[in-house]
Image (cartoon, helix red, strand yellow):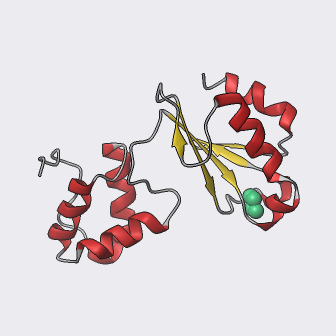
């Protein structure tokens, strides 16, 4: 097992804050590696499967390395009803990958997510922490240019 870099996990935290700890660890390490999850389980005296279960349940957590820009398209009902699939297809065409993949140059990771709180402006997506709403296929190319 490789050594987890110091500072990834705060060992003095309450296991009930597992989600917060996972997010903090991901922010520091870039993603949740097997080593980070094992270290977190050990330090909190909980099972690895519990940590893994939480890490894989939430779409904002990743157990795989992420690209420099993470595109998250909302697939919840209001966005679904506003043809979110056409936005997915536009992004696939623009960057050449499908949801769940990362570009070869690590510039983009593309994924689907649940509601991001912009339902009144559906369809919507996040790129990193930036909300883009009222999306149309025509807007996608221009939006992505800002992240290339
Ligand atoms: S349903 Fe898409 S932002 Fe809420």
Position above or below: 113 against 140: below
- Give the number of marks: 0
Q: Position of residue 73 (x, y in %)?
A: 68, 50
Q: Compared to 147, does 126 lie above or below?
A: below
In this picture, residue 133 sits left or right of residue 126:
right
| Residue at x 70% of width, y 55% of height | 74
Q: Position of residue 30 (x, y in %)?
A: 36, 43
| Residue 123: % across, % down | 81, 51
**Rendered image quadrant of residue 24:** bottom left
Q: Residue at x 31, y 76 (%)?
A: 50
Q: Is residue 39 left or right of residue 85?
A: left
Q: Is residue 147 left or right of residue 2?
A: right
Which of 78 and 65 lies nearest the eye of the viewer? 65
Q: Is residue 10 left or right of residue 56?
A: left
Query: What quarter of the picture does the C terminus occupy?
Result: top right
Instruction: Mark yes or no: residue 112 visible.
Output: yes
Residue drawn 77% across the image and 25% down it = 142
Q: Quadrant of residue 35?
A: bottom left
Residue 123 seen in the current view: no
Query: Which image quadrant is residue 20 in?
Result: bottom left
Q: Quadrant of ligand 1?
A: bottom right
Residue appearing at x 50%, y 64% in the figure: 58
């Amino acid at each position: 097992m490789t050594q987890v870099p110091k500072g990834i996990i705060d060992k003095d935290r309450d296991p009930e804050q597992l989600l917060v700890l996972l997010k903090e660890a991901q922010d520091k390490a870039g993603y949740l590696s097997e080593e980070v999850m094992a270290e977190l389980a050990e330090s909190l005296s909980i099972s690895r499967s519990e940590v893994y279960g939480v890490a894989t349940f939430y779409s904002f957590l990743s157990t795989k390395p992420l690209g420099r820009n993470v595109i998250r398209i909302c697939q919840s009902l209001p966005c679904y009803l506003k043809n979110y699939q056409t936005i997915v297809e536009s992004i696939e065409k623009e960057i050449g990958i499908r949801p769940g993949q990362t570009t070869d140059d690590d510039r983009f990771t593309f994924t689907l997510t649940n509601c991001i709180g912009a339902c009144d402006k559906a369809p919507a997506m996040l790129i990193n922490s930036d909300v883009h709403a009222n999306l149309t296929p025509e807007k996608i190319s221009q939006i992505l240019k800002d992240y290339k």
